[in-house]
Amino acid sequence: MRLLRFLVFGIMSVILLPSNMAAEWQWSVKIPGIVSNETNDHPQAFLWIPSDCIQVKGVMIGTHNMTEETLFENALFRERMSEIDLALIWITRGGIRNGT
């Protein structure tokens, strides 16, 4: 229970800290075959890899269902991800529309 409280507090601290919004995303691509029910457009996936990373050791994926964008663009969060060579992928809102 203490660990859960610690994790929740840690995540909320990162989210609520001032950040440099409009953070850098090195690559992005529209996702073909999926159309967002909200935007009637294809979702877009963004990739960030730490600038000093020689080899990516893991990837964290956020699918825009809560506060991933805010967390992923937080300067302190990215600094910590850089320390462990973790890349980030953020995917904008999307839902599968099957055309029926």
Image (cartoon, grey):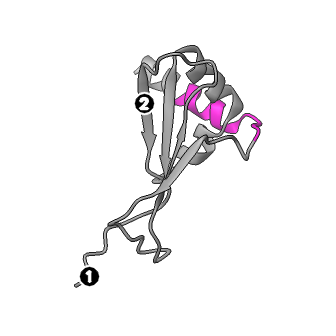
Pick whichever, 79 or 29, lies toward us: 29
User: Residue 59, percent across and down?
Assistant: 42, 30
Pick whichever, 54 or 80, lies toward us: 54
Boundaries of the magenta span: 8-20
Q: Quadrant of residue 50?
A: top right
Dot 1 falls on a residue whose secondary structure is loop
Which residue bears the numbered disc 2? 59
Residue 52 sits above or below residue 91 on the image: above
Quadrant of the rendering where the N terminus is positioned: top left
Q: Is residue 94 left or right of residue 9?
A: left
Reply yes or no: does residue 87 show up in magenta: no
Q: Earlier in the sequence, mark 2 or mark 1?
A: 2
Total marks shown come to 2
Pick whichever, 10 or 62, lies toward us: 62
Q: CA distance from mark 2 to mark 1?
A: 32 Å
Answer whether labels 2 and 1 touch (C-beta < 8 Å). no
